[in-house]
Amino acid sequence: MPTGTLPLLVHGAAVSLALAVGAVVGGTVLAIGLTVLAFSRLAALRGFYRVYVYVVRGTPLLVLALLLFYALPALDLRTGPYIAGTVVLTIYTAALFAEVFRGGVLAIPRPQWESARSLGLPPLAMFRQVIVPLVVRYTLPPYVNVCVMTVKASSVLSIISVWELTLAAREIIERTFAVFTVLGLAAALYFVMCFGIDRLGRRLERRLALQGFA
């Protein structure tokens, strides 16, 4: 293995993980707002939700990355590739998370809604005590799956010069020509990150189950 290969790849993996974490946090917040729009009484807001989700999910992430990367400077918004990459991943994951959350709300049995209403709970209390626990129960596995997908999707950002794991591997290969060694190590690092996220998700599921929350 060429000298210095592993430290560079580990550094690239850390950048990929940081981008994914930022996108997951931002995407989750944005997705909650989108989910509220999905169940709005206003048709215009529900329409905006559908358009957002259909357009973002129906457009390849590579195209979204290039479009945003070149569109922001055209709008006089001077951002670097890392900010643009995080924004792209946030927009993309928000659409996926929103559909996950919407499915969780729709999965709540009707008797649960009727019981909450019969208790006379105010909307905020019903949201906190009934909707949130059930949505977490139904959506945690697919939510973790999207988190894993986000780590892998960060590799697309190399197209806009974001120095993450994939771009680091490409640069090392250009210097050393150790294709299989470098790509094998990069694949192993992606696996470790994704496997770690999956294990954390499973551990959270077990903890919530012990608490009677899921």
Image (tube, rainbow, N blue to C red):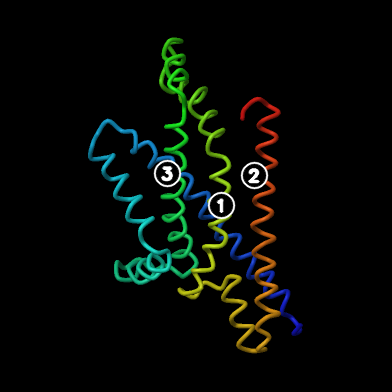
| Dots 1, 2 in contact, CB < 8 A | yes
In the image, residue 198 sits, relative to residue 205, either above or below, namely below
Q: Residue at x 56, y 33 (%)?
A: 137
Residue type at tag 3 = Glu
| Dots 3, 2 in contact, CB < 8 A | no
Mark drawn on residue 147: 1
**Element class at badge 1:** helix
Quadrant of the frame with the N terminus: bottom right
In the image, residue 17 sits, relative to residue 106, either above or below, namely below
Residue tagged 3: 99
Q: Which of marks 1 and 3 is nearer the N terminus?
A: 3
Q: Which residue is drawn at 45% across and 17% down?
A: 111
What distance separates the C-alpha of mark 3 from that of mark 2?
A: 19 Å
What distance separates the C-alpha of mark 1 from that of mark 2?
A: 10 Å
**Within-10-Å neighbours for mark 2: few <14, some 14–19, many 20+:** some
In the image, residue 211 sits, relative to residue 169, either above or below, namely above
Mark drawn on residue 201: 2
Residue type at tag 2 = Gly
Q: Which x, y percent locates residue 99?
A: 42, 44
Mark drawn on residue 178: none
Q: Which x, y percent locates residue 123?
A: 41, 21
Viewed as shown, does residue 214 lie left or right of 58? right
Q: Which of marks 1 and 2 is nearer the N terminus?
A: 1
Residue type at tag 1 = Cys
Quadrant of the frame with the C terminus: top right
